[in-house]
Amino acid sequence: METVFGLVGDGFALVVTDTSAVQSIVVQKTDDDKIMVLDSHKLMGCTGEKGDRVQFSEFIQKNIALYHFRNGIPLSTAAAANFTRNELAVALRKNPYQTNMMIAGWDKDVGPSLYYLDYIATLHKLEKGGLGYGAYFILSLMDRYYEKNMSVDKALELVDKCIAEVRARLVVAPPNFVIKIVDKDGARTLAWRKTVEEMSGPPSQ
């Protein structure tokens, strides 16, 4: 029951995902970070099959780094999103990846931007959006409470509303979420929202 969503605010973009790793009826871990830092000013939140998600996100991250190394300039967020879309479209006709993603970035001349990309290589530029089962509940909240050029504090209030709705409405709701931000200062973790702490060993006697 994975969830990824994001929004664009005043000079920044946020990406939020759940952090549950699930196999069948078993929760394997609750601190699985599904938001890949592609470079200093880009984030990619992914959901989907674990193998596809990890392999594809790392493949994109390394190719973006390779482009920068070869050419001396980084890809823009739009170029990175279109490159990712092209790789997904090529794989779709051979061995498709079962993964959906939200790509966020900040560019000097453009500012923050957010892209929606699903497993059949549909790419859209958005100001707010979500994927996964949680999106059924949060998109209406975003339509109601999202404002253009929101501050970070207001954006976090909306994120908290969305997380609370997913926890209340989704039949198998993930307990923990990670929130990452990208702005002129770079991409980084902004906050965690936890209701379950990961155990480091067996239960105490």
Image (cartoon, rainbow, N blue to C red):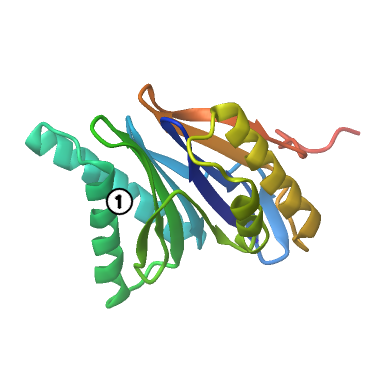
Image quarter in which the N terminus is found: bottom right
Badge 1 marks a residue whose secondary structure is helix
Q: Quadrant of residue 168?
A: bottom right
The residue most toward the bottom is: 93
Which quadrant is the C terminus positioned in?
A: top right
Q: Quadrant of residue 16?
A: top right
Tell me if residue 202 comes above or below residue 175 in the rendering: above
Residue at the extreme right:
205
| Residue 58 image offset from top left, x and y in percent | 35, 47
Q: Residue furthest top?
A: 185
Q: Which residue is mark 1?
A: 59
Seen in the image, is 200 located left or right of residue 70?
Answer: right
Q: Residue at x 64, y 58 (%)?
A: 140
Q: Amino acid at mark 1?
A: Phe
On the image, the x and y values in percent for residue 78 come to 26, 48
Residue 199 image point, x, y percent: 74, 36
Q: Along the line of sight, which residue is nearer the eye, 53 or 106?
A: 106
Is 115 left or right of 110, judged from the image as shown?
right
Residue at image position (60%, 51%) is 142
Residue 180 or residue 123, whichever sits in front: 123
Of 111 and 32, nearer the camera is 111
Q: Nearer the viewer, residue 68 or 32?
A: 68
Q: Position of residue 4 (x, y in %)?
A: 55, 52
Say which residue appears at 36% left-offset and 67% top-offset.
122
- Quick one: label 1, few (<14), some, or many (20+) residues within 10 Å? some
195 on left or right of 183: right
